[in-house]
Image: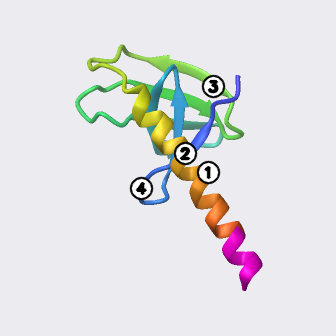
Amino acid sequence: SQVPFILSNNDEPQVIYENAIFNFNQKNQSTKYWLCVERECGVYIHTSLTGQFTRINGTHTHSLNLDQIAVKILRDKMKARILAVSFLIN
């Protein structure tokens, strides 16, 4: 299945999978590797280069913060709206 993409505070790509956020780590010719944003957790997922989920390794060692995901999604929508309006004004 396709995983939703968001941006970090530094405009770096992140994905949401099973109510957890993952940072981009690296890629090869066919796979992108994503690490859980909680550094000590160690869970990582694999996606295809087109964003299709392929597998997950590990179990989260922390509670999942659904509010954090909601805030990030809202922030991305607000940022896109501001940029669209700004483009129209200029």
Instruction: Please report whichever mark, 3 or 2, sits nearer to the chain's N-terminal start.
Output: 3
Q: Which residues are magenta?
A: 85-90
Residue 27 figure quarter: top right
Q: CA distance from mark 3 to mark 2?
A: 23 Å
Where's residue 2, x and y in %?
70, 29
Depth check, mark 2 against mark 4: the one in front is: 2
Number of the label disc, if any, that sits on residue 9: 4
Identity, as a three-letter code, of the amino acid under mark 1: Lys
| Residue 42 vertical placement versus 87 (above, below) | above
Identity, as a three-letter code, of the amino acid under mark 3: Phe
The residue lying at 70 percent from left, 70 percent from top is 85
Identity, as a three-letter code, of the amino acid under mark 4: Asn
Tag 3 residue: 53
Residue 89 figure quarter: bottom right
The residue lying at 61 percent from left, 51 percent from top is 77
Q: CA distance from mark 3 to mark 4?
A: 23 Å
Left/right placement of residue 28 relative to residue 61 reads right
Which residue extends farthest top? Answer: 59
Depth check, mark 3 against mark 1: the one in front is: 1
Depth check, mark 3 against mark 2: the one in front is: 2
Tag 1 residue: 77
Q: How is the image coloured?
A: rainbow
Number of the label disc, if any, that sits on residue 74: 2
Q: CA distance from mark 4 to mark 1?
A: 13 Å
